[in-house]
């Protein structure tokens, strides 16, 4: 990895609110970038996200562009990781979106999530 692209990676274990969620009809997974994080008593807004196969391999997946949404369709050969970026933060918030079949980033307002069943829990 080129030195100018080196970033400190902040991996966070997510609690049930952001991790797999159960639904009555079937078990599904839902993962979401927090719209804001607090670091050192400062709040930082979500500014973007990417989806990688087997992070940190740097195999960034290319989305389909659908208006104000970018969408990734994940097949069974991909082990998806949702990588969240925040304003004025060099760290990356990395979520292992195990079992996700679709990932989306919306821009109005900004949001980023991956899921296997319905879009939201």
Image (cartoon, grey):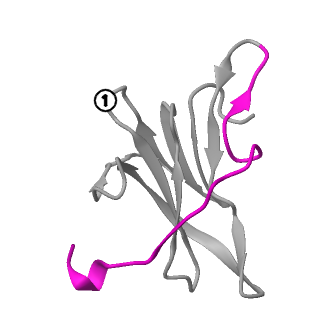
Q: Nearer the viewer, residue 109 or 100?
A: 100
Relative height, residue 7 to residue 55 (above, below): below
Relative height, residue 108 to residue 117 (above, below): below
| Residue drawn at point x = 55 percent, y = 82 percent | 89
Quadrant of the image containing the N terminus: bottom left
Name of the residue lying farthest toward the top: 25
Circle 1 crowding by C-alpha within 10 Å: few under 14, some 14–19, many from 20 = few
Q: Nearer the viewer, residue 95 or 45?
A: 95
Q: How many marks?
A: 1
Q: Quadrant of residue 93?
A: bottom right
Where residue 69 sits: x, y (%)?
A: 52, 49
| Residue drawn at point x = 54 percent, y = 53 percent | 95
Side (left or right) of 93 relative to 16: left
Main SS of residues in magenta: loop
Q: Quadrant of residue 72?
A: top left
Quadrant of the image containing the C terminus: top right
Magenta span contains residue 17: yes
Side (left or right) of 8 relative to 42: left
Magenta span contains residue 27: no
Q: Quadrant of residue 28?
A: top right
Where residue 50 sits: x, y (%)?
A: 43, 57
Relative height, residue 18 to residue 87 (above, below): above
Where residue 109 sits: x, y (%)?
A: 67, 61
Where residue 84 sits: x, y (%)?
A: 53, 63
| Residue drawn at point x = 28 percent, y = 59 percent | 58
> Helix or strand or loop: what does disc 1 sit on?
loop
Task: Name the residue that disc number 1 marks.
Answer: 77
Q: Nearer the viewer, residue 47 or 91?
A: 91
Q: Which residues are magenta?
A: 1-24
Relative height, residue 59 to residue 11 (above, below): above
| Residue drawn at point x = 76 percent, y = 22 percent | 23
């Amino acid at each position: 990895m080129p030195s100018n692209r080196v970033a400190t990676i902040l991996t966070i274990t997510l609690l049930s609110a952001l991790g797999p969620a159960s639904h009555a009809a079937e078990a599904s997974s839902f993962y979401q970038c927090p719209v804001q994080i607090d670091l050192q008593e400062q709040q930082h807004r979500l500014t973007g996200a990417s989806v990688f196969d087997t992070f940190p391999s740097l195999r960034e997946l290319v989305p389909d562009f659908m208006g104000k949404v970018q969408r990734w369709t994940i097949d069974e050969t991909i082990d998806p990781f949702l990588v969240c970026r925040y304003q004025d933060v060099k760290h990356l918030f990395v979520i292992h979106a195990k079992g996700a079949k679709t990932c989306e980033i919306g821009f109005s307002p900004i949001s980023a999530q991956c899921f296997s069943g319905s879009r939201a829990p």
